[in-house]
Image (cartoon, helix red, strand yellow):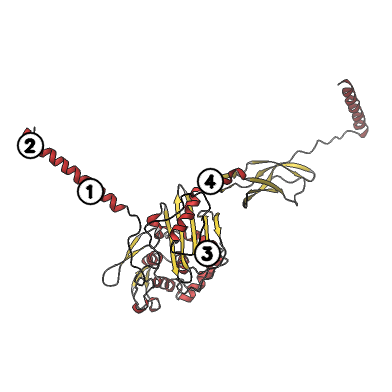
């Protein structure tokens, strides 16, 4: 038992320990929370993208956004459903968004553990680095594909893009041919690449095509984890390691942000492809030709996608869909596929479902034959169409094989009975 005279010291020690512990907890919590990305150098020594410390978005996320950028698209990352579009098919320079395709091709055709020997054409002389994002690779430097991908997609290093192009295709021109072939293969119909980094601004794409590209890239193993990384350290051939920082400020500022890439040239303006996920809903926003508020505009689009839409099931595969009238008779039909989609919450009461009969359908159709489709619309937008197939066909009437005189006598007798019933009613 502690003597009475020592108890004040004991109380004091407990109080001091509690204060120190609380300070440590608060300090650790504060170290994990930042209002925005840490400051980075500005041109000509560093980032060509704005690094805001706060986003400015409308308080009403239910209203369609008023995007001031030249072109923009908001879509679901999983199935590509477009939720908002402004000039989605207008061809525009895309600056460093080009590097999404460079990263996709690199991951498809090489391993992150592969080692690249940097060729002289990838090196940007120190005198030419002003205003240009580079990792600072040196001729003959041996560096992993993985580290080059981090430099490409976080820091937007133009020299990393050329080094990867040389590694994958043997030369920059051959790699550009591969880029355009891959774009055609995945349905980027309005895109033309001219370099692996977009620095020259001669290439172009559209907001809709970039949604297609991003969906393909994010499905690749490894791509999503790279573009969601805030910081990465790349070893240098000599001297201190190279610390790089992601230029996508949304990773710090927007809850649920997962990527993807920023870009800027004076001709392209500020561009961004931004992805985010909340409660299982994954969205991608593309903004081309924006101003320095490009991150806020991307956040506004994402807010709209998360707040203003409801996942709605219109029909389930195999579900009965009533009866369809064909020339000669009617048949019961069912949905050959399911249909669900995001719908503006304000439009749920205005959903219209219309059965459209196939003019080529003849009676009697075979079970399982497509005879119509269900067209689902809301004002100003077609949600989708679902094939309707025959679930059952009425059985034909039984064949009466009695002699004609028996059938005639039976018909006369039935007519007499009908007349009697009518008279007595």
364 or 16, nearer to the observer: 16
Q: Quadrant of residue 392?
A: top right
> How far separated are the C-alphas under marks 2 and 4?
66 Å
Please state if 387 lies on the left or on the right of 89 as rendered: right
- Where does residue 48 sit, x and y in percent of width and height? 39, 68
Q: Position of residue 145 (x, y in %)?
A: 38, 67
Whole-number angstrom distance, CA of label 2 to CA of label 3: 75 Å
Identify the residue position indicated by label 4 in the image.
Answer: 310
- SS of the residue at dot 4? strand
Residue under the image location 58 percent in, 66 percent down: 189
Q: Which residue is mark 3?
A: 70
In primary-sequence order, the first of circles 1 and 2 is 2
The tag earlier along the polypeptide, 2 or 4, is 2
Q: Tell which circle, 4 or 3, labels the residue nearer the N-terminal end.
A: 3
Give residue 24's mark.
1
CB under 8 Å between discs 1 and 4: no
Q: Of label 2 and label 3, which has the lower sequence position? A: 2
User: Mark 2: which secondary structure?
Assistant: helix
Residue 43 in view of the camera: yes
Farthest residue to the top: give it. Answer: 424
Above or below, 210 against 402 in this view is below
Relative height, residue 119 to residue 367 (above, below)? below
What residue is shown at x 28% (from left), y 49% (from top)? Answer: 29
* Residue 370 visible, this orientation: no
Q: Which residue is mark 2?
A: 6
Q: What's the distance in space between the residues labelled 1 and 2, CA to CA? A: 28 Å
- Percent position of residue 171, x then y: 45, 76
Q: Is residue 31 left or right of residue 381?
A: left
Q: Residues within 10 Å of mark 3 (few under 14, many from 20)?
A: some
Label drawn at residue 385: none
Q: Position of residue 76 (x, y in %)?
A: 51, 54
Check whether the beta carbons of the residues at disc 4 and disc 3 lie within 8 A of each other: no
């Amino acid at each position: 038992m502690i003597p009475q005279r020592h108890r004040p010291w004991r109380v004091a020690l407990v109080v001091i320990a509690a204060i120190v512990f609380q300070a440590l907890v608060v300090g650790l919590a504060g170290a994990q929370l930042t209002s925005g990305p840490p400051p980075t150098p500005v041109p000509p020594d560093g980032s060509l993208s704005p690094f805001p410390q706060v986003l400015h978005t409308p308080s009403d996320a239910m209203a369609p956004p008023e995007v001031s950028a030249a072109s923009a698209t908001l879509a679901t990352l999983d199935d590509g459903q477009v939720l908002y579009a402004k000039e989605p098919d207008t061809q525009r320079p895309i600056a460093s968004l080009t590097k999404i395709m460079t990263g996709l091709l690199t991951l498809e055709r090489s391993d992150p553990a592969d080692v690249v020997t940097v060729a002289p054409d990838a090196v940007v002389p120190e005198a030419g680095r002003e205003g240009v994002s580079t990792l600072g690779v040196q001729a003959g430097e041996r560096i992993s594909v993985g580290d080059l991908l981090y430099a490409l997609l976080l820091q937007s290093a133009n020299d990393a893009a050329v080094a990867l192009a040389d590694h994958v295709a043997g030369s920059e021109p051959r790699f550009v041919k591969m880029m355009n072939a891959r774009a055609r293969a995945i349905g980027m119909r309005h895109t033309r690449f001219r370099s692996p980094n977009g620095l020259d601004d001669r290439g172009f794409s559209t907001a809709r095509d970039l949604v297609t590209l991003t969906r393909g890239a994010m499905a690749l193993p490894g791509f999503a984890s790279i573009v969601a990384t805030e910081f990465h350290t790349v070893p240098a051939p000599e001297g201190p390691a190279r610390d790089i920082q992601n230029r996508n400020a949304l990773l710090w500022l927007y809850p649920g942000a997962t990527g993807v890439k920023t870009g800027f040239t004076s001709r392209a303006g500020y561009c961004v492809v931004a992805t985010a996920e909340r409660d299982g809903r994954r969205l991608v926003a593309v903004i081309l030709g924006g101003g320095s508020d490009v991150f806020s505009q991307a956040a506004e689009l994402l807010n709209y996608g998360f707040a203003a839409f409801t996942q709605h099931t219109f029909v389930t595969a195999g579900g009965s869909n009533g009866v369809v009238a064909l020339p000669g008779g009617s048949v019961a039909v069912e949905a050959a596929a399911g249909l669900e989609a995001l719908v503006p919450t304000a439009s749920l009461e205005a959903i219209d479902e219309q059965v459209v009969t196939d003019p080529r359908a003849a009676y009697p159709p075979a079970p399982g034959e497509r005879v119509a489709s269900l067209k689902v619309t809301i004002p100003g937008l077609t949600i989708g169409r679902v094939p309707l197939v025959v679930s059952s066909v009425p059985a034909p009437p039984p064949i009466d094989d009695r002699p004609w005189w028996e059938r005639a006598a039976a018909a006369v007798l039935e007519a007499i009975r009908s007349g009697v019933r009518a008279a007595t009613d």
